[in-house]
Image (cartoon, coloured by chain):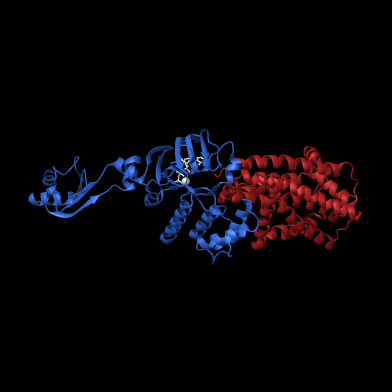
Amino acid sequence: MSEGAAIEAEGLVKSYGDVRALDGVDLTAPAGTVLGLLGPNGAGKTTAVRILTTLLPADGGRARVAGIDVATEAPQLRRRIGLAGQYAAVDENLTGFENLQMVGQLYHLPKGEPKARATELLERFDLEDAGGRLVRTYSGGMRRRLDLAAALVARPPVLFLDEPTTGLDPRSRIGLWETIEGRVAEGTTVLLTTQYLDEADRLADRISVIDHGRVIAEGTSDELKDQVGGEALEVTLEAAGQAEAAVAALDGVASQRPELDGIVLRVPVAGRKGTIAAAVQRLNDAGVGIDDISMHRPTLDDVFLTLTGHAAEEDGEGEE
Amino acid sequence: MRASAISDTLVLAKRNFLRIARAPDLLLAFTVQPIMFVLLFAYVFGGAIPTPGHSYIDFLIPGILVQTMAFGGFVTAMGIAEDLRKGLIDRFRSLPMSRAAVLAGRTLSDIATNLISITVMLVVGIIIGFGFESTFLHVVAGILLLLLFGYAFSWVFAFIGLTSSSPEAAQSLGFIIIFPLTFVSSAFVPPETMPAALQWFAEINPFSTTVNAIRALFIGDPAGNSVWGAVAWSLGIAAVFAFLAVARYKRAVVR
Ligand SMILES: Nc1ncnc2c1ncn2[C@@H]1O[C@H](COP(=O)(O)OP(=O)(O)OP(=O)(O)O)[C@@H](O)[C@H]1O
Ligand SMILES: [Mg+2]
């Protein structure tokens, strides 16, 4: 574990009856960075967040957040964290303003601050017009934004966001990303769980991929992509019958055996430079018709698929 | 630490009041429902139940007040079960606030709604013929005892709310526990008329002790030890269930 990390967990274990939700999870996030926790449904993301925010005792392992032990110093820790759980936790029978004010009061902010913060955050989250309305009249996305605003009330140095953009429209999503980036620029550390790979790609400095309660890969987005494999050339053929000729023609370009999927030939290559020109030249010389040709860098989707054996968002209710 | 526990409790009690102001249909439970009970019992059973020494309405009002206090906390059970399900309890538990405040705020606001119920029932009772037969101070003491008893059962309901899987389950669990306690007591009929086993239970039932204490304070029945007994029962129930509920709150898990 690194010194001075804002979030550090070692060997976290948690079982619910027979279900081993966490099976020895290590996590590290240096101060001022975003750690993305990426995993399919039932992977254990929420369980990890609940342990790190003092809501749930772990069965085993240790964790420190902002240098404070999660298990033994929970009361001190609660002053320094903000949590937006997986489902918006706001009071339907209060207005947006009253919700934020209440949270500020419960953080024991100095007199006057709860009101000031509520006003400021409603504005920041595009809710100033709705701030005086009861939350039960809010749309799902508005509740979600209010919930996130509540997590920011006390300007906590460490933020836990459990699938913060689920249910937001594209504009709100980008707005939220910008807010998170703003907080991080000011030095906040963020642990973010998500099933959206573009979100992890954009926000997270480091990503831990978690499945069945274990971290199965860890690194920057680029490192993870490299782990899955480097660049590949994707050639869409005019006719499937020419596949063999194409493979033969590209022998000098490929770094590994090409794979054929219908009429799309996927050719792992060593580098990017000049590859397309060389490939086109060779295929032309061999008389192979090309419909389309492009360089393909692995996406986090590929990473996810390769590591977990299933795509990010497909593995549905089965494990709930 | 203590000062902040009190201010946290007040913040949450205020939240509960706002809820009642904004969903006034809830107020029906505190006003119309007790009136309905008073009228039904007074006119449906009134003629059939002999109550030596008193008119049935004088006998009934203390009993039905105690029953209403016992049920007053159901708002707490439902509210807590709902907060749990909506994830609000998680939010509160992640904040640097007192561990008892959510529950204390609930039970505190129950006192106010219970006071509304008492007022409404006494007014209706007096209209249909109930009369105090004691001093003003006894009446005040009786009302305080009713509020204390209601407060104790709010803690019972807080515990029920934390252990139920949904607000509906909390409500029916509450009814299952409290209905037999109120009916097998001296609240509506003199226990001497019950079969021996029920009579035995009715006599040790804290509901009977409290009803007898209220009868002593309102209509001048001999008090015996019932007033102190009722205070002791209420304090005991409040202490035990406050302890259980707070312990449960600390580990509350959304299911
Ligand atoms: N309170 C509970 N009781 C029993 N099992 C639970 C409980 N909470 C979680 N689990 C189980 O633990 C495992 C991990 O759940 P968790 O909620 O941490 O997953 P997740 O990664 O957050 O999933 P999702 O993407 O669906 O939110 C799942 O198999 C889940 O069914
Ligand atoms: Mg989850």
Quick one: B170 or A298, which is closer to the camera? A298
- Split into 4 quadrants, where in the image is the C terminus of chain B? top right
User: In the rendered view, does A241 fall on the left or right side of A211?
Assistant: left
Quick one: B49 or A153, which is closer to the camera? A153
In the rendering, at what x and y percent does residue B25 appear? Answer: 66, 61
In the rendering, at what x and y percent does residue B120 appear? Answer: 78, 60
User: In the rendered view, does A290 fall on the left or right side of B217?
Assistant: left
Quick one: B202 or A175, which is closer to the camera? A175
Q: Residue at x 67, y 50 (%)?
A: B8
User: In the rendered view, does A238 fall on the left or right side of A75?
Assistant: left
Color used for chain A?
A: blue
Q: Residue furthest bottom?
A: A129
- Split into 4 quadrants, where in the image is the N terminus of chain B? top right
> Is any part of residue B195 visible from this angle?
no
Which chain comes out red in the rendered image? B
Q: Residue at x 44, y 46 (%)?
A: A33
In the rendered view, would you say A9 is above or below B75?
above
In the rendering, at what x and y percent does residue A174 appear? Answer: 42, 58
> Is any part of residue A76 visible from this angle?
yes
User: In the rendered view, does A289 fall on the left or right side of B244?
Assistant: left
In the rendering, at what x and y percent does residue A92 appear? Answer: 58, 58
Q: Residue at x 26, y 43 (%)?
A: A230
Quick one: B68 or A53, which is closer to the camera? A53
Numbered label tally: 0
